[in-house]
Amino acid sequence: MTQSIATETMAPPAVTAPGLRQSTGSRTEEKKRRRQRVLVLVLLGIPTAYMAFFLGVPVVKAIYLSFTNLGLTGPDAAHSSFVGVQNYTTMFSSSAFWQGLKASAEYLVGSAIIGQVMVGFLMAVFIERLGRVARSVLMSLMVLAWIIPEIVVAFIWSGFLSTPKGLANILLGFVGVAPVSFLYGHAMLSLVVANAWRGMAFSVLVLGAALQAVPTELIESAKLDGAGEWGIIRFVRLPLIRTAVATVLALTTLFTLADFTLIFVLTGGGPNNQTNVLPVYTYQTSFSFYELGYGTAVSLVLLLLACGLAYFYVKVGARDLKGAK
Amino acid sequence: MSTMTAPTRNDPPGPSGPMLVGAWRGTLRGTRKRIPKAAIFIVAFCFFGLPLFVLVASAFNGSATVSFAVPTHPTVSNFTSVMASGTGFGTAVANGFILAGGSALIALVLGAIAAYPLSRFKFRGRIGFLLGVLFVTGVPVTALIVPLFEFFRGFNWLDSSLWVTLLMAAFATPISIWLMKTFVDNVDPALEEAAWMDGANRFTGYVRVVLPIMSTGLLVVFLLNFITGWANFYLPFILLSSTAKLPIAVTIYQFFGSYGQVEYGRLAAFSILYCIPPAVLYVFTGGRFGGSFTSGAFKG
């Protein structure tokens, strides 16, 4: 990424007066340029090498491992052997893998796209209509849910949704509904709701800030043209905060796809693998069934999906970087 | 309904018709606006508040289980018993601070190193590098955990706090670079140039002039990384095994696994204690994190 660096010098250390610099000729200029190029290479090289070592080398190694029968214990741990594409054929013909992919897709659509982005947008619109006190009360609760560690979110929801006498079921009892076993009967829905609960603040903060930045003149002129409240939101404000929506969409889907802890603690992937999203499936195959080679193959599929989403995120960023230039 | 003949298409509208409808619609809109607003607020308030209330109520209930009950005699016994000596609470907290603090500090330094050329020099590949860093921000731990485990096993680094800290720093570095670059952008280069006039070189100018000006930004990046590291459960869960080395994130999980259902009160108290550092630090930074992801982060 840093190869062929052509530096357009920004004021180098000013030991000479500006007028003098031009007369000293191009040799000093050239030398300074070269020094700056070296400086850029060194300064960017240190963090790049650091990240490449810890994040890049394992990925490269993973590609090799996914073609072996490496195990966690036993003879396959000490001497793994090359098995060709066996892990991949096993994976693509395994119903557990497809179930994992399906669970990941459901979790992603339900929790990230519908829960955090769509409901998050409506919440951002709603919250700016509230009075100052009501708004800060609601926002504080959301932010609190967002900043507590994920594992605590899992503990909270395991208590809140527990059967038969968790608070959610007690409240349902008041309106005459028999106890619901949320984490067994409606496992995916429970996870979707719990994760939306946890991530809502982020979308509301970012989308709310973007909505605030929409110029009031545009809203006023739309009102004069006879646009209703929803018309203004739909046709004036939403198009203007496209970039913020795309950013939130990219980040929340990435976080949600990669989410492990909440699911691992709340449902453990069950019941019957219904919520066995790819990160949990990877964990299960590698560290419960001890099939590291196979687990690596699943990891690589997950990594590929994440890279696809990250690419989308980068494209949004690139548009912004160019817009700012 | 039947007494008031509804106007059909053939009926000429009576003179009072539109006005009446208008007035009726007006009051309807007024109430329609106010009642749902209050209703939505109450629903949202309960949805976000009640789960948190369960945690707090259980923590102060000496005999709490997952069956919810409002404590009749609130007590702090859950907190004292979790923190009692011999439970390893202190060790777990200390380990959490070492992993989160150490990795946050390393990522901060690496971020500061990369931010300078990205902000102060214009060179070919600069935008590409920034986008590459952004891309790495999106690479999830969960997709790399198996290869990382194998990587660590190969070097005999399993159960080493030092290497886990260094690894956590690697995951925190991309976001640090992004945020630090924006903060350096916001410091006027003229201030640095003035220091050069006084004989400082680029390094001392950066360290003595630029970094102190953006100290708030440094703090925000450090705290953001700290909070992320403090909550990091998966990496230490997989890569560390000795009880003496486990951070609080893993200890609390083990407690949940062994006593979660019956000792819910103690689990809740443990959870609240675990949440205190991130909550305090968040307040300390003035709630800057939401914005730090977008506003400004995407400026060239």
Image: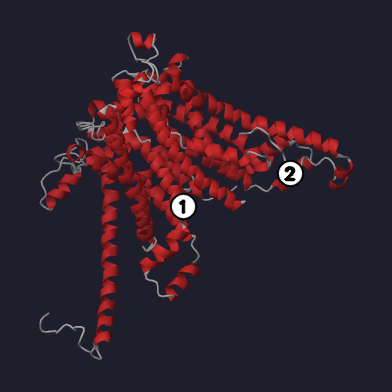
Q: Report the coloring of the rendering.
A: secondary structure
With respect to residue B152, does A22 lie above or below?
below
Which of the two labelled residues, at mark 1 and mark 2, occupies the earlier sequence position? 2
Identified at 38% across, 57% down, the residue is A124
Q: Residue under circle 1?
A: A244
Residue B164 image position (x, y, % from top left): 46, 23
Q: Is residue B22 above or below residue B87?
A: below
Residue B248 shows in this picture: no
Q: Position of residue B189 (x, y in %)?
A: 70, 46
Vertical arrangement, residue B158 with respect to residue B171, above or below: above
Question: What SS does tag 1 mark?
Answer: helix
Task: Name the residue located 83 percent from the left edge and 40 percent from the top edge.
Answer: A15
Please name the amino acid that badge 1 sits on: Ala
- Marks 1 and 2: CB-CB under 8 Å? no
A34 relative position to B147: left or right: right
Q: Amino acid at mark 2?
A: Met
Chain holding disc 2: A
In the rendered structure, find residue A110 and report the number of the disc placed on it: none
Numbered badge on residue A10: 2
Image quarter of residue B218? top right
Local SS, label 2:
loop
Does residue A25 appear left or right of residue A55 in this picture?
Answer: right
